Image (cartoon, rainbow, N blue to C red):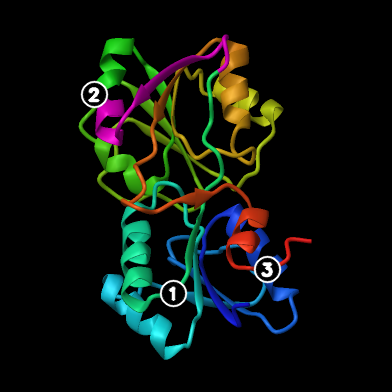
Amino acid sequence: MPSHVLVLGGTTEARELAAVLAGRPGVRVTTSLAGRVARPGAVPGEVRTGGFGGADGLAAWLRERRVDALVDATHPFAETMTRHAAHAAATTGLPAVVLRRPGWRPGPLDRWHPVPSLTAAADLLPGLGSRRVLLTTGRLGLAAFAQLTGPHFVVRSVDPPEPPLPPRLDVVLARGPFTVTDEVALLREHRVDTLVTKDSGGTATSAKLTAARELGLPVVVVQRPPLPPGVRAVQDVAGVLEALGLDPK
């Protein structure tokens, strides 16, 4: 049984896992946050904020703090951190688990347009005839849309976004979760005709997809990056506990 678990966090699942581990006798849990959100929610256990200095810096931190298990519960699009975690785990020989919520799947009434990247999403919008676009891709990815002068964009973010930004832009500062009623109201208020989002998965942010379906709007969905070679993900906290040799009950 591990005595010190490092959770690379920033997701709902990471907080849930930290709460479970913090309640286990003999298990110390430290959650690492990137620090990109000014006021993150409370996280059980110990918390550190900021980067490690790359994969080698993470490996050194794991050795210095005598961590004996690593859980990557970052966002499905935190590609660099996931790659660094896989490298650090291999370097130190620690057991490592990737926690990834299942991705979304379109229903028969959805009008989804899957794309491999934010750049591809931006390239697709003119062909869709999009005039008013809700971007829910995160404030750090807005540069991909900065060159588009035709559409009027609406961006929802916890913290104000920084340049480069699209020239025609409204910013809505809000923290979820949001209900379907909330999302329908937002789409109608801003007269949105296209939604752009990432395949974050899970139920916490899926209300916007239901709202877009109800209003018949096209949705441009940025697909997830692949996991590093040889890395396998589990879909829930119980899967992590099992992988770490902890009783999930």
In the picture of the structure, the residue carrying the numbered disc 2 is 123
Instruction: Tell me if residue 150 can be seen.
Output: no
Label 2: state its secondary structure: helix
Cα–Cα span, label 2 and label 3 = 46 Å
| Quarter of the image where one finds residue 214 | top right
Label 3: state its secondary structure: loop
Q: Is residue 203 above or below residue 239?
A: above
User: Which quarter of the rendered picture does the N terminus lie within?
Assistant: bottom right
> In the drawing, does residue 47 fall left or right of residue 181?
left
Residue occupying the point 68% across, 71% down: 21
Q: Are marks 2 and 3 in contact (CB under 8 Å)?
A: no
What residue type is disc 1 on? Leu
For marks 1 and 2, the one nearer the N-term is 1
Instruction: Tell me if residue 48 can be seen.
Output: yes
Q: Nearer the viewer, residue 216 or 103?
A: 103
Residue 114: in magenta span: yes
| Image disc number at residue 246 | 3
Residue 249 placed where, x, y %? 79, 61
For marks 3 and 1, the one nearer the N-term is 1
Q: Residues within 10 Å of mark 1 (few under 14, many from 20)?
A: some
In the picture of the structure, the residue carrying the numbered disc 1 is 94
> In the drawing, does residue 210 fall left or right of residue 158?
right
State which region is magenta.
Answer: 107-122
| Quarter of the image where one finds residue 146 | top left
Instruction: Give the foreground label among 1 and 2.
Output: 1
